[in-house]
Image (tube, rainbow, N blue to C red):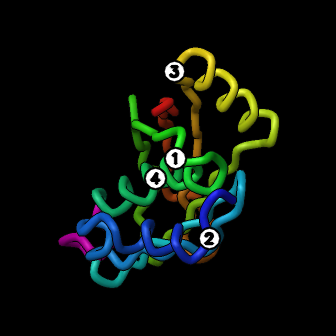
Amino acid sequence: MPYPEEFIRQLTEEHIAFVKRTGLKAEVLEPGHVRLRMPLKGNENHIHNMYAGALFTVAELPGGILMLTSFDARHYYPIVKEAGLRFLRPAASDITVDAWLSEEEIQRIAEEATHNGKSDFVLDLQLKDKDGTVVAESHAIYQLRSR
């Protein structure tokens, strides 16, 4: 990892004021793998399930965090080009999401961004409740750009 894990954890959990207010936690921060947890407490909607904005937040963040764990941020930065969320059932507990990029995909993205100034990558993720039930699915297109 280009940066120490605790530095990435602090950026993930505290750097964006909105995210800090949600209480989101980074449980796994490894090259090619990120796991985030969004707590239900403090993020409930009017019917005591997780607010859609909290679900969107935990679905959108992994692309940027994977950049920090898998690429050298001195040379690259991420942007979100497109993001969508499909709600499958109410989220009545904390929610986790795991995001993965293979070594081959990390290498492809870095080489393309170095040569072309940018590289798109897609993350299709499942948001799961405490029992492992999928409550929502996300599809996002990110772009890694060279500085």
Q: Amino acid at mark 1?
A: Arg
Residue in the image at 44% along x and 66% along y: 12
Q: CA distance from mark 4 to mark 1?
A: 25 Å
* Marking on residue 117: 3
Of badges 4 and 3, nearer the viewer stands: 3
- Sequence-wise first label, 2 or 4: 2
Q: Residue furthest left?
A: 46
3 vs 1, front mark: 1
Sequence-wise, the earlier of marks 1 and 2 is 2
Q: Earlier in the sequence, mark 4 or mark 1?
A: 4
* Res 96 seen here: yes
Quarter that holds the C terminus: top left
Q: Nearer the viewer, mark 4 or mark 1?
A: 1
The vertical placement of 99 against 27, above or below, is: above
Can I make out residue 141 in this image? no
Label 4: element kind? helix
Residue 59 against residue 124 in the figure, above or below:
below
| Range drawn in magenta | 43-51
Q: Tell me the CA gap for discs 4 and 3.
A: 26 Å
SS for dot 2: loop
Residue 117 rendering spot, x and y as whole percentages: 51, 21
Mark 2 is surrounded, within 10 Å at the Cα level, by few (under 14), some (14 to 19) or many (20 or more) other residues, namely few
Q: Which mark is residue 59?
A: 4
Type of amino acid under label 3: Gly
Question: Which residue is labeled 1 in the image?
Answer: 74
> Where is 37 relative to 72, above or below?
below
